[in-house]
């Protein structure tokens, strides 16, 4: 079976390629390398002994994508490709709407033209916005509060409409919580920009000596230690969730939305202390003002994933921190230039 992985050179995409290849799938990757480095595919090959077919292409480029579909009989699409920085989406909303929605529309056109039956869509917990309650089930109202989250919400709506018009096809919309960690080998991980947008890679930069301290945004939330609580999931668990979603989608038609998380909330300081314990390295931090739009608490109810996919997260917070430190220690500059 042949799987097209858009954005397959990125953090989650590359780890998913490893799991797909190890499970015997043929893998085709489309990635324009705008926010990733081809070195990640070299690492995928080193881990699995296999290299995906690779096309350096923008998924919004319909001609380029049609060439891929004409050269390969694609059975399943996993759609990761898209911009993902919340802050940047607020500053440049048109860039996000154009890229994230157009790429999805191009793939749906190709699904129709080349008779591809199955789509796994990379959605996000940001579709829930500020949740009314925790843990968050898939029935929670969808009210994203930034352009990035709205592109995921709109992407879900577009896919649902497409699937309603093509009842023989199947889509699984996977709403991720906060992926962290790295492959156990320590050679595949999250290659972040100079100033990361997320907590774990920022901690990694501090430990690698790139920053003097971590900034913690607020310690006056209604949480056990005053810092924000989130659901962190090991990236390898997340990758395996996509394989479970393929199996489910191949046996069903229509559209399902499914949370991928652990169901456990950890505070910012919980993560800091767990990383210190896993690495033996202190993580200095300072408390700064809250960021606008940050919820106090946000974590998943992952029971639907267990019920429908037979999937649940295996790795705990210590495993996540240990693997992240292993990656950072071996790759203090990420994949380099």
Image: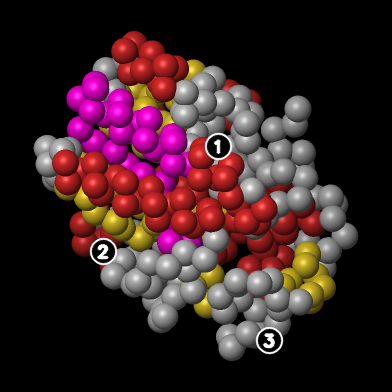
Q: Please give the name of the residue rendered at 31% of the width and 33% of the height, measured from the top-left corner.
A: 108
The residue singled out by tag 3 in the image is 220
From the viewer's perspective, is residue 284 above or below residue 87?
below
Tell me what residue is drawn at x 38 percent, y 13 percent: 67
The residue carrying mark 2 is 304
SS assignment at label 1: loop
Q: Earlier in the sequence, mark 2 or mark 3?
A: 3
In the rendered structure, the answer to whether residue 71 lies left or right of residue 9 reads left
Q: Position of residue 152 (x, y in %)?
A: 43, 52
Residue 167: image tag: none
Q: Which residues are magenta?
A: 100-127
Residue 87 appearing in the image: yes
Q: SS at mark 2?
A: helix
Magenta region, main secondary structure: helix
Q: Nearer the viewer, residue 198 or 49?
A: 198
Element under label 3? loop
Residue 208 drawn at (x, y percent): 80, 50
Estimate the spatial distance between the alpha carbons at disc 2 and disc 3, rounded to whole Å.
33 Å
Question: In the rendered image, which residue does mark 1 sit on?
Answer: 10
Percent position of residue 57, x then y:
51, 21
Quadrant placement of the N terminus: top left
Residue 180, image quadrant:
bottom right
Q: Is residue 143 magenta?
A: no
What crowding class fits label 3: few (fewer than 14 Cα within 10 Å), some (14-19), or many (20 or more)? some
Q: Counting residues from the N terminus, which is met first, the one under dot 3 or under dot 1?
A: 1
């Amino acid at each position: 079976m042949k799987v097209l992985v858009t954005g397959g050179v990125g953090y989650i995409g590359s780890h998913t390629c490893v799991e797909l290849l190890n499970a015997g799938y043929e893998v085709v990757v489309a990635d324009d390398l705008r926010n990733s480095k081809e070195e990640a595919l070299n690492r995928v090959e080193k881990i699995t002994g296999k290299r995906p077919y690779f096309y350096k292409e923008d998924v919004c480029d319909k001609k380029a994508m049609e060439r891929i579909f004409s050269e390969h009989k694609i059975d399943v699409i996993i759609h990761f490709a898209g911009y993902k920085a919340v802050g940047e989406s607020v500053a440049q909303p048109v860039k996000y709407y154009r890229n994230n929605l157009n790429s999805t529309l191009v793939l749906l056109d190709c699904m129709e033209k080349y008779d591809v039956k199955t789509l796994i869509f990379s959605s996000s917990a940001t579709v829930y916005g500020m949740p009314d309650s925790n843990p968050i089930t898939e029935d929670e109202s969808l009210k994203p509060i930034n352009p990035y989250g709205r592109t995921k919400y709109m992407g879900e709506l577009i896919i649902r409409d497409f699937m309603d018009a093509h009842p023989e096809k199947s889509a699984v919309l996977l709403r991720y919580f906060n992926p962290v960690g790295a492959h156990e080998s320590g050679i595949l991980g999250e290659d972040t920009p100079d100033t990361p947008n997320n907590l774990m890679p920022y901690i990694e930069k501090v430990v690698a000596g790139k920053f003097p301290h971590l900034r913690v945004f607020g310690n006056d939330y209604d949480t056990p230690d005053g810092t924000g609580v989130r659901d962190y999931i090991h990236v390898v668990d997340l990758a395996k969730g996509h394989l479970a979603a393929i199996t489910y989608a191949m046996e069903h038609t229509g559209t399902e939305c499914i949370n991928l998380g652990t169901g456990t909330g950890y505070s910012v300081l919980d993560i800091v202390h767990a990383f210190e314990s896993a690495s033996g390295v202190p993580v200095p931090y300072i408390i700064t003002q809250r960021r606008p739009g940050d919820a106090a608490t946000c974590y998943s109810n992952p029971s639907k994933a267990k019920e429908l996919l037979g999937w649940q997260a295996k790795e705990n917070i210590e495993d996540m921190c240990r693997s992240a430190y292993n990656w950072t220690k071996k790759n203090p500059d990420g994949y380099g230039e």
